Amino acid sequence: MIARRHFLQASLSAAALVGASGFGNWGRLAAQQALSQSDLLDQETTGNVTLIHITDIHAQTQPVWFREPEINLGVGNAEGKPPHIVGADFRAMFGIPKGGPLDYALTYDDFTALAQTYGRMGGLDRIATVVKHIKGDREDAIVLDGGDTWQGSLPALRTQGADMVRLFNALGTEAMTAHWEFTLGIDRVTEIVESELNFPFLGANIFDAEWDEPAFEPTQMFERGGTKIAVIGQAFPYLPIANPKWMFPDLSFGVRQERMAEVVEAARAAGAECVVVLSHNGFDVDRKMASEVPGIDVILTGHTHDAIPEPVQVGNTFLIASGSHGKFVSRVDLDIRDGALQGIQHRLIPIFSDVIAPDAEMTALVNETRAPFTDEMAEVLGRTDSLLYRRGNFNGTWDDLICEALLSQREADIALSPGFRWGASVMPGEEITREDVFNATAMSYPAAYRTEMTGEMLHIILEDVADNLFNPDPYYQQGGDMVRVGGMGYRIDVNQPQGSRITDMTVLKSGAAVDPAKTYVVAGWASVNEGTEGPPIWDVVEAHIRDQGTVSVPQNTSVAVVTD
């Protein structure tokens, strides 16, 4: 099992004492090459309150392949700390045996080979089984959704999120916060919140831009286990920067640290003995917020898709990172007594879809939501000789394939693809279906534009995105991962200040340096500018795959990364 118990002194004035981790059990299971549902789910129920956390599922209702990042760089105070460790370093830090189920679930090494042993992960019907099992131990466990739920698949796109709303209602969700939900447009979000959603949509940091007043409820108070728990929602703070502001023009966002402090204080004044922040800030932003806002007991963090098998403690606050795409569910048992949190036990539950039995009711409901699109999604477009994945600070092979499609289909010199973290993997030798393509491209502003940019403008774009990722102050990290580039290479020194990180920009076809004064034809997609024209990116990618028949994506060596 993945478990670690933390005991806090009654005063909460000292660091938690750490008990046995339980990783030895996983080592034995790995050696036996055997897993059972009870191995994954059974644990001693402790404390008096249980939280169930799911985040960043990106509308993935089916079991998926999903490779974790090979590069996840931390800067400033986050350097070398979780989640900014990968592969062998990750295994060493958390005592994970190489080649075992946790290695497969949590790192990138030998992913293709280990996938043959451990299979796909996720599936909402398996998640439903996990939720019901936990509720069998603690009937009033609180199910919380960290957002990025209504976007990321063909059915979610076609139904404007209605499929996922229906499914998470059925799951028994009791509160959520948001990010990509707002890319459905404010009218659709309002319609869902007011007439379709069975639970609160929380966002303490979302304000009406004109009146500077809260636009959504900040907090939901729960009375469970003889105590009061405040759950505060924190939506993605940088929506108007990372996504099209014209889709929600009357809203303003931001970390709003002072606002969070006020909401925490108000929750305590209303009798909350435990304060939980249901966050879509991203891990490093949450780490900083935990260090600067007193009174938060637990932050259920999201947005950056990190899966960490133990809580990360910052002062008296515990950060829980539950991964993405339905690969994991976090169970958090809290011991709340004498007006305060006294202890916490966390288990990151890996959803091995061949081990956890699907819940029949959820299977039927998922199939019902997918039925209108089944034939369309199942159409085979081609095959892949390469593992197609998207996850990490720089280009993944899915991104390289999309860039190749933009270069060829849009007749461009250079291609730009956004640094999205969402998108399930496709294994080498597998057919590529239309569903696979939509899993990597399904969103509401998909136009594949074709324009002209000077070399100087390309440098400015790369520098701007790099600062969003590698600014040492987490509150200035306002985007996803690095913009993916096709047809061009560059060198990046992540420790340099903005304006000096990107050098040696080169046009790959000619080998010539990018000329700041020269104009290049650039193709890209997912522009945040209103009125962007071009075919939807999924049509561009589909045409390219059909032209190729079988795609092969070589290792990308065009980006040289300097970290020292």
Image: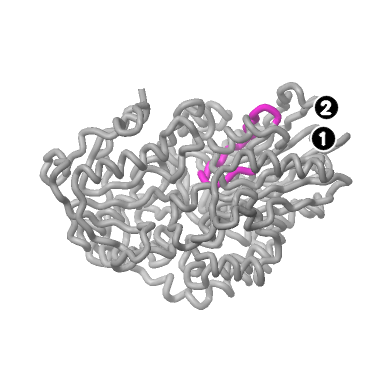
Which residue in the rendered view is the most extreme toward the bottom?
Answer: 372
Q: Give the quadrant of residue 526.
A: bottom left
Q: CA distance from mark 2 to mark 1?
A: 8 Å
Residue identified by numbered label 1: 340
Residue 1 position (above or below residue 193): above
Whether residue 181 is in magenta: the answer is no
At label 2, counting other C-alpha atoms closer than 10 Å, the crowd grade (few under 14, some 14-19, many 20 or more) is some
Write down the region rendered in magenta. Answer: 300-316
Callout 1: helix, strand or loop?
strand
Whether residue 309 is in magenta: the answer is yes
At 35% from the left and 41% from the top, the residue drawn is: 464
Q: Give the quadrant of residue 500.
A: top left
At 72% from the left and 41% from the top, the residue drawn is: 264
Residue type, mark 2 in image: Ala
Quadrant position of the N terminus in the picture = top right
Residue type, mark 1 in image: Ala
Left or right: 357 as drawn, with respect to 382: right
